[in-house]
Image (cartoon, grey):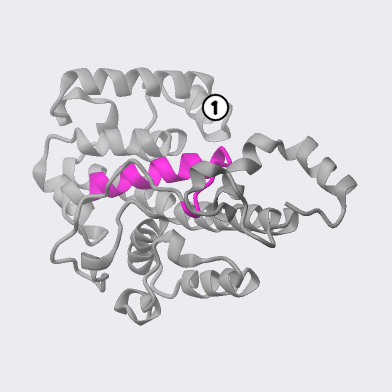
């Protein structure tokens, strides 16, 4: 590997670490990669470019997932209150199928509520005698994963179907997709490599969706492209005029040297109805 500025490279390695950068070197190895022989023309700057691309991709992903997460918080709380006629349904065992899962969730709620310094929680404590706040407050202090845990344990099939239907999918697919997005969100938060990762979790295959989807017959559902499609699908429902496609194109234009086929993108992805 060649270095145009070794002192600068040393500063990067001091602050980023070789261990973190090592996974961005792998694409530059000759086949078989186990020999650890770099391709001719490999530079530290090219490795750093790949690292920066991945960083910007994670920021894009996190920002788009946030919109979905906020919508799920709102829909879960409001649909539950309306369907069950109970503003405090999330903390009532009556509405959940598995009592053990409910108690585990309640333990998390206790911890989050007792430790919260949010103004609306503080105001609730001094203004009301109830132990727990209403559902729309509780969903705001729980993690993405906790929301999915609550949804998957709802006893009412009708309520679960209504919530999933709002997002244009079946309940089983909704749970799977939320699990996948929660996992991806956590990876983004912890600055893990995502651009060419082969993810462990496999999303459930969606059939007969409400809105435009993709031809999955030629897609690797363990790559980031499939997850980007899930995000785009949900965004198209909650924010029909979203600009995620434009953001992706801008990122790819800025880093045109990055091979997006390693991300699972098919050559004709722009022609898919989902992205039009």
Looking at this view, name the residue that lies furthest to the left. 157
The residue closer to the viewer here, 68 or 221, is 221
| Residue 229 on the magenta segment | no
The residue closer to the viewer here, 189 or 36, is 36
**Placement of the C terminus among the 4 image quadrants:** bottom left
The residue closer to the viewer here, 122 or 47, is 47
Splitting the image into 4 quarters, where does residue 23 fall? Answer: top right
For the point 36% across and 71% down, the residue is: 266
Above or below, 146 against 227 in this view is above
Above or below, 98 against 228 in this view is above
Question: On the image, numbered disc 1 is attached to which residue?
Answer: 122
The stretch in magenta equals 174-196
Task: Name the spot of residue 238 as percent of width and height, x first.
Answer: 36, 64
Task: Name the spot of residue 29 as percent of width and height, x first.
Answer: 57, 52
Task: Name the spot of residue 59 as percent of width and height, x first.
Answer: 58, 54
Q: Please give left or right for residue 213 compared with residue 254 in the image.
A: left
For the stretch drawn in magenta, the main secondary structure is helix
Question: In the rendered image, is residue 131 in sight?
Answer: no
| Residue 184 on the magenta segment | yes
For the point 37% across and 36% down, the residue is: 145
Above or below, 159 against 132 in this view is below
For the point 47% across and 49% down, the residue is: 32
Count residues near mark 1 (Cα–Cα under 10 Å), then give few for <14, some for 14-19, many for 20+.
few
Task: Name the spot of residue 15 as percent of width and height, x first.
Answer: 77, 37
The residue closer to the viewer here, 217 or 100, is 217
For the point 48% across and 58% down, the residue is: 64
Splitting the image into 4 quarters, where does residue 89 fall? Answer: top left
């Amino acid at each position: 590997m060649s270095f145009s500025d070794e002192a600068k490279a040393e500063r990067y390695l001091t602050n980023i670490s070789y261990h973190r950068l090592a996974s961005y070197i792998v694409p530059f190895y000759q086949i078989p990669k186990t020999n650890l022989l770099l391709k001719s023309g490999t530079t530290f700057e090219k490795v750093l470019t790949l690292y920066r691309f991945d960083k910007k991709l994670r920021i894009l992903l996190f920002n788009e997932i946030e919109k979905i997460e906020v919508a799920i918080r709102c829909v879960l709380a409001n649909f539950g209150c309306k369907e069950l006629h109970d503003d405090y349904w999330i903390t009532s065992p009556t509405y959940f199928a598995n009592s053990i899962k409910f108690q585990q969730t309640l333990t998390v709620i206790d911890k989050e509520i007792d430790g919260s310094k949010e103004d609306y929680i503080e105001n609730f404590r001094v203004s009301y005698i109830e132990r727990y706040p209403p559902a729309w407050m509780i969903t705001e202090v729980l993690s993405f994963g906790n929301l999915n845990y609550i949804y998957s344990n709802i006893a009412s099939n009708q309520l679960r179907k209504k919530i999933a239907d709002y997002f244009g999918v079946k309940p089983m697919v909704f749970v799977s997709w939320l699990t996948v997005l929660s996992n991806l969100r956590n990876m983004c938060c912890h600055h893990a490599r995502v651009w060419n990762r082969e993810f462990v979790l496999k999303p459930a295959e969606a059939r007969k969706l409400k809105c435009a989807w993709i031809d999955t017959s030629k897609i690797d559902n363990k790559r980031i492209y499939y997850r980007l499609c899930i995000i785009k699908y949900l965004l198209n429902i909650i924010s029909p005029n979203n600009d995620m496609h434009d953001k992706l194109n801008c990122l790819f234009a800025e880093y045109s040297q990055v091979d997006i086929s390693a991300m699972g993108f098919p050559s004709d992805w722009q022609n898919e109805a989902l992205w039009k």
